Amino acid sequence: MAAKGLSRAKEVCSQRPAVAKGATARGKKVIGYPCVYVPLELLAALDIVPYRLYGEMREPVTEADRVLPASFCPIMRSCLDCALKGRHDFLDGVITIHSSDPQEKTARIWQSYTTLPYFHFVDMPGTTRPEAVDYFASQLKGLVTTLESLSGKKLSADNITKAINAYNHQRSLVQSLFELTRPSPPLLTGTEIVQVIKAVMSLPVDEGNQLLTEVIEEAKARKQKSEAQRARLLLWGSTTDDAEVMAVLESNANVVFLEDCGGYRPYRGKVSTAGDALTALARHYLTEITCARTFIQNVAAPTKKDYHKDLHARYGYLKSVITDWKVDGVVLLLVRYCDPFAFEVPAVKDYFASLGVPATYIEYDYTEGSLAPMRTRVEAFLETIG
Amino acid sequence: MAEGVHLGDLFFAGIDIGSTMTKAVIINAEGNIAAAIKGPTGAEHRHLANDVMLKALDGAGLKLEDVACIIATGYGRFNVPFADEHITELSCHAKGVCHLFPGARTVVDIGGQDAKCLKVREGRLIDFAMNDKCAAGTGRFLELTAQSLGIKVEDLAALSEKATSPVEISNMCTIFAQQEVVMHLSQGKRIEDIIAGLHRALAERVAALARRLGVEPEVVLTGGVAKNAGMVLAMGQSLDCELLVPEEPLLTGALGAALLARERTIRLLAEGKPLERKPRRLEKATFYS
């Protein structure tokens, strides 16, 4: 464990299962989750280690093809493929959530075709209305019940507050991490950030916070390079889990902001510590995580619509990102069949156009073979804004 | 201007390694073409950008040293070890097309393995859309379906002219479209009508790509598929506008690359910077596995 900071992040990414098995060996329960809508505070409070499940872009999908239709989210397909190949057998269980239909539809297959001791599917509403928050809180209560029986521990005011504080600290650390991409040139590359976030999502919260603290220190100590000015890009999409994808985007540019679930999105805001913890978690996760799958509308009553607030919550918040991070161009990057985000592309692209920021939409099929065409598209885009 | 260097003495080259064809163009200081050649890329030849370059040099009666700058483009652009710079085929096509048609606003390029639509202005690429990783909507679609009809790609245009009622090809998957072709044949449809149907299907697919960007005249059609008059007709019908086609629709990318090489050199000379004539040798790509 000699490695620290960025080299530690790289090390963790290259041996994620081994890192998780280490926690298992120390007597901890480790639960996998593919989507950042799962409130990790509930796991941490019960001394369970959350472990983000990713697909494996370089692993040909073979097993999942036996059980899944063809036109289907390649990331969930790959996650399930890894599960069916026994790659997650060290886990004590998996939690999936109804953030997208592929997750809901694979839940049963996951349960039927793997032998994990624990599996929980969380239902989640599609809007942010008050009754939706209440419903989501009730579903989280159900999750707590099964997690309690798995861990043999009880959720208490004390342990959930501690967990919320620990993850709030993680949020503020990631927010600080992104402060380091504001200078020109940035002190951290997007490729490094993807690795750091991936490592953090593979570690217990305190270890993740330790890693983030080290990375921030390391990057702050870096000498500002006086290299030729490169274009500063904002990446908008569902999730980026592969450093090589980022390396393609960054071959002639810097990705200074990652508006996706492998970057900033899961760490926006803070969970309130006032009032009922489950309601606070439900409200935070539903409203602060700006996934395109959620219909974000602040006031539903016909006479009291707050369009400005609605626009801000949907994608208007990106306006200040563009200014604060001095963004030159936006890459809307989606994995094929990511319908919730694909439906949002025309509006978001037009919104960037209205701000006078060039944007390009690139779709890839989550295979290594898609990297070369991606490179051509990224380069061509950079040539248009260069 | 750097000492001893006269722009008028210099030549510039663009080399475009596409999925199917490799193209090279050498121009002089005025931007006039000194040599232009094309040949199949093929499995072996993608290592051999050097051969293509050599042939182009021979064609122009030049030596490698006479060329001030070489820009490589196309999907094999990284396999040209002697190039000074790599620029995507999108920017090079934009440059080449605008040189030939200064009024061009939209370019539709249908190559062997991809189709792209470009919005251009004054020689610059403004926006673009490219097809998915799929043969549908590319020259390969016509190649393969022609094969299943037992005819040559070169004959498609003449045959399609004799169509009286083109068939509907509903499936744009190249493989399934072949099956549809077989079905039409078995139903006794005329080959001419089937070919015209294929042209329409391909044109519709590419037009959908172009509509994403918005089609503004003048519209220029390039790429190998533009040599097929039947496709030019179908594409014009799908886009509901007149299409301009360069005399050599395959060469616009390489021409654009050569023009960009010329611009780069003029820029360097204007800034008083030395021309980075790195010791170039026409060797075959070794890093390509």
Image (cartoon, rainbow, N blue to C red):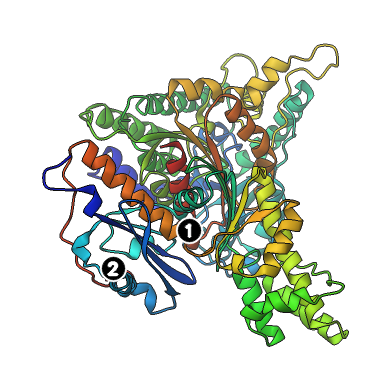
State whether residue A325 is above or below residue B215. Answer: above
In screen coordinates, is A244 left or right of A70?
A: left
Q: How far is the residue under mark 1 from the one under mark 2?
A: 27 Å
> The disc labelled 1 sits on which kind of residue?
Thr
Q: In the picture, residue B205 is in which quadrant?
A: bottom right
In screen coordinates, is A5 left or right of A164?
A: left
Q: Nearer the viewer, residue B124 or A126?
A: B124
Label at residue B287: 2
In screen coordinates, is A171 left or right of B226?
A: left
In screen coordinates, is A369 left or right of B140?
A: left
| SS of the residue under disc 2 | loop
Q: Quadrant of the C terminus of chain B?
A: bottom left
State whether residue A116 is above or below residue A340. Answer: below
Q: In the picture, residue A39 is in which quadrant?
A: top right
- The structure residue drawn at horizontal position 66% and vertical position 42%, both measured from the top left corner, is B216
> The disc labelled 2 sits on which kind of residue?
Phe
Horizontal and vertical percent for residue B168?
Answer: 83, 69
State whether residue B136 is above or below residue A301. Answer: below
Q: Nearer the viewer, residue A127 or A341?
A: A341
Horizontal and vertical percent for residue B78?
Answer: 35, 61
Mark nearer the N terminus (1 vs 2): 1
